[in-house]
Structure formats: structure tokens, C-alpha cells
Image (cartoon, rainbow, N blue to C red):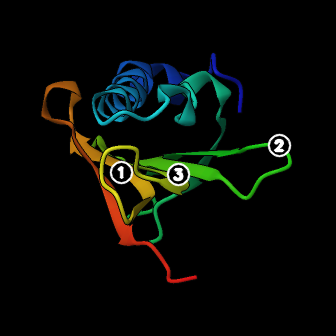
Amino acid sequence: MDQQDPLFERHAALLAAACALAQQQLAEQGFDPTLMPTCKRFSYRQQPDPFTGEATLNGHWAAAQSQRRAQLVVNADGSLLLECDLLCPHPGVPGRWAEQISVWGRGVAALKGEISLLAQLEE
């Protein structure tokens, strides 16, 4: 899907805000904010919602030579869910790994996000 597509353009501000929030939260917790790609690095496609049939915007990103991935969906009602794998030790919480960062909400001003933590595995 071309980033000039009307569906992409309609949601561009929401996508940019979601990626910026994720990068901000990463930086605030001591991570490299570039672990979260910008929304321009995603590949997008339009898909019908399985329940309503309305168009949804779906984005995917994969790091070269890595298992890190990110995905997002903007539903027809304008709600967004973004998830990006981190899979690294948390720089400020000893014994914890950061699994992923998630951002969700409907509308730029209503976005929320969090970093999911896992206990470090025993060696």
C-alpha cells in the first residue's frame, strides 16, 4: 500500500503519535528509542475487518537479520493497537527483560502505552 493512499493519510497523525509515544516511553525507561521504528518504516496494507467488513489499516515491520518485529492495526472505528518486540534486558530493572512495548487507544490524545516485562531466565 502506498503511503499516499487515502486510508493511510486519514490515519497518519495517529500512526505518528503512536510511534512517537512508544519511542518516548522507551527513552524515559533508559532504552534506546530507536528500538521502535518510525511509522514510515512499516509496510502497510488494507484488510477488511472480519466482523464488519470495513477497511482496517495494517502495518508490519521486521528488523533485518533479527527476530524483532512490530505490527499495528487501525480499525475502522479509529482505534489503534501497536506492538513492537524488544527482547532485551531492562536497563533500569535488574533481573527483568523487556518483552515488548504496546500502544493502544482511539485518537491522538487518548493513546496509552506500556512496556511488558518478563523475569530473567535462570542460566
On the image, numbered disc 3 is attached to which residue?
A: 86
Label 3: element kind: strand
Amino acid type of the residue that numbered disc 3 sits on in the rendered structure: Leu
Label 2: element kind: loop
47, above or below 25, in the image: below
21, above or below 59, in the image: above
- Is disc 3 in contact with disc 2, using a CB cutoff of under 8 Å? no
Relative to 79, is 48 on the left or the right?
Answer: right
**Which mark, by number, is residue 116?**
none
Label 1: element kind: strand
Q: Residue at x 73, y 58 (%)?
A: 67
Amino acid type of the residue that numbered disc 1 sits on in the rendered structure: Ser
**Which mark, by number, is residue 102?**
1
Instruction: State the quadrant of the C terminus.
Output: bottom right
Amino acid type of the residue that numbered disc 2 sits on in the rendered structure: Ala
- How far apart are the two marked residues, 1 and 3, measured between alpha carbons? 10 Å
Please name which of the two marks, 3 or 2, marks the residue nearer to the observer.
Answer: 3
**Along the line of sight, the residue nearer the viewer: 28 or 41:** 28
On the image, numbered disc 2 is attached to which residue?
A: 64
**Along the line of sight, the residue nearer the viewer: 83 or 86:** 86
Label 2 environment density (alpha carbons within 10 Å; few <14, some 14–19, many ≥20): few
Label 3 environment density (alpha carbons within 10 Å; few <14, some 14–19, many ≥20): many
| Residue 29: quadrant of the picture | top left
